[in-house]
Image: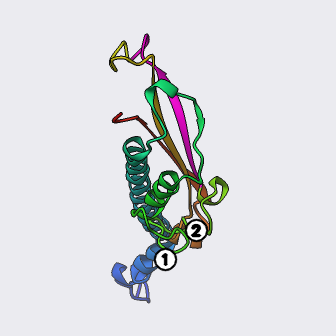
Amino acid sequence: MTGRPTHRRRPTGRRQAGTASVEFVLILPLLMALFALAVDGGRMLGDYHTVSKSVRDAARFLARAEPGIAAGRCMAGNLDRGRANVSSAIRLAMTGRVDGDPASDGLVIGWHAANLSEAATGIGVTLECLDNASGTLDGLFAGAAAVPSIVVRARVPFRFGPARALGLGPAFTLQVAHKTARLGV
């Protein structure tokens, strides 16, 4: 028995039997984080689109329905939230219906309000006057020196779901605004 080792060599496949399991366990947290961020990113884009559409609808509703705004009396500032059309527009923005209940029928998760104040809803409704004589409008609206425009702004809280459970994704606010010129007489 000269020159030969006394022990047998193991096949190389047995040494790597648990390697795949260990690699999977090491990469699993990263995969879970990526999946959670993808889910929440999709939710965020969906919520932004919903809020953007609802704010646009509310501005168009007010631009057509609010009789107290006339081109000859363009006074910039906040619109009175006590007016029926303004409160209907706020309900429309939050619930998708002019008679919706913002306390329970919010279009977006977490966007509910017990009352229609700006602090509670995150919705601001203002009137701005666009100069018709010069600038970008350049006399587009005949017979008016200033054109009233309805501006609806919304600040909607967004909270991450699955990513937050993993300690990712802080809470932040989606901010959307839409401006529409007053329509009609």
The structure residue drawn at horizontal position 43% and vertical position 12%, both measured from the top left corner, is 135
The residue lying furthest to the right in this view is 119
Q: Residue 103, percent across and down?
A: 56, 72
Q: Which mark is residue 25?
A: 1
Q: Is residue 128 magenta?
A: yes
Q: Is residue 4 visible?
A: no
> How many labels, in total?
2
Q: Amino acid at mark 2?
A: Arg
Q: Residue 165, percent across and down?
A: 58, 73
What stretch of residues is rendered in magenta? Answer: 122-136
The structure residue drawn at horizontal position 43% and vertical position 11%, both measured from the top left corner, is 133
Compared to residue 33, the image places residue 83 above or below, namely above
Q: Residue 159, percent across and down?
A: 56, 64
Q: Which mark is residue 122?
A: none
Comparing 18 with 100, the one in front is 100
Compared to residue 21, the image places residue 156 above or below, namely above
Circle 2 sits in a helix, a strand or a loop, which is it? helix
The residue lying furthest to the top in this view is 134
Comparing 76 with 171, the one in front is 76
Circle 1 sits in a helix, a strand or a loop, which is it? helix
Residue bearing the label numbered 2? 164
Mark 1 or 2, which is nearer the eye? 2
Type of colouring: rainbow
Compared to residue 113, the image places residue 118 above or below, namely above
Q: Residue 158, percent across and down?
A: 55, 60
Crowdedness near tag 2: few (<14), some (14–19) or many (≥20) residues, C-alpha within 10 Å: some
Comparing 97 with 156, the one in front is 97
In the image, is 49 to the left or to the right of 121? left
